Image: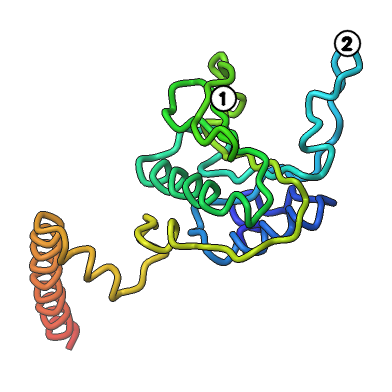
Amino acid sequence: MLVTRKNGTSGVGAAHAAVWALVGHLDKVLPSTFWFGQGKGEPDYDANGKDRNYEHSSGYALDVMVTDLGASPSKIELANALKLCSWAQKNASAIGLKWIIFSPYQDGYAYSWNPSRGTWKRLYSGYGNKSAAHMDHIHFYLRGSSFGVIDDSPLQSSIERNVEDMTVQELHKELNDNPMMSLIASRIGMVATALDKVVKQLDDVSDKLSK
């Protein structure tokens, strides 16, 4: 499960059932590069008594980490993150989405998207802090309603995955679809075959010398 990947423990905690429903669904459809960060969080009051962590402390928010904490996502991780954003936008009504916050342009700013506006809006700078700028995670804030019918097509169509997550058939297709990668793989295979022959010859020589 994603809740036990990378960080070893679940930070979702005693979140609302809708958040856990989101976790349960995404855990089945996302590759291992994603993991779940904060769900239910502690209040963080400012000098005026305002809870700056209200969305998390309310139990209706979830951070889906797209890379390591405080890191910039790789090209594949960013592509996957944007597909997850598209999934959230397509399923906004079904999952009871209020808004998501992410840095789709990876420019050091956090942006929000909500169903009523339908576009990204720049919120604030992270002032060099990638987590504060939401560059390393997508923040989901839900209404807490029951889930409707989910459309996973934004994820299933062409979501990128690491090599360790791919089957042999998928790796072959990836190579066949990319001539340069196919050529490199072919050359590597030829070198590996030649090395196997050399190793076998050395083994034969070693056996003869030991007799």
Residue under the point 12% across and 83% down: 204
Q: For residue 147, what is the image quadrant?
A: bottom right
* Residue type, numbered disc 1: Ala
Numbered label attached to residue 133: 1
Image quadrant holding the N terminus, namely: bottom right
Vertical order, 45 against 7 (above or below): above
Badge 1 crowding class, 10 Å Cα cut-off, few under 14, some 14 to 19, many 20 or more, is many
Residue under the point 67% across and 57% down: 22
Residue under the point 66% across and 58% down: 4
Vertical order, 124 against 134 (above or below): above
Q: For residue 48, what is the image quadrant?
A: top right
Look at the numbered disc 1 and give the secondary structure of its residue: loop
- Left or right of residue 93, residue 104 in this image: left
Q: Which residue is mark 2?
A: 47
Q: CA distance from mark 2 to mark 1?
A: 22 Å
Rendered location of residue 98, percent (x, y): 67, 40
* Residue type, numbered disc 2: Ala
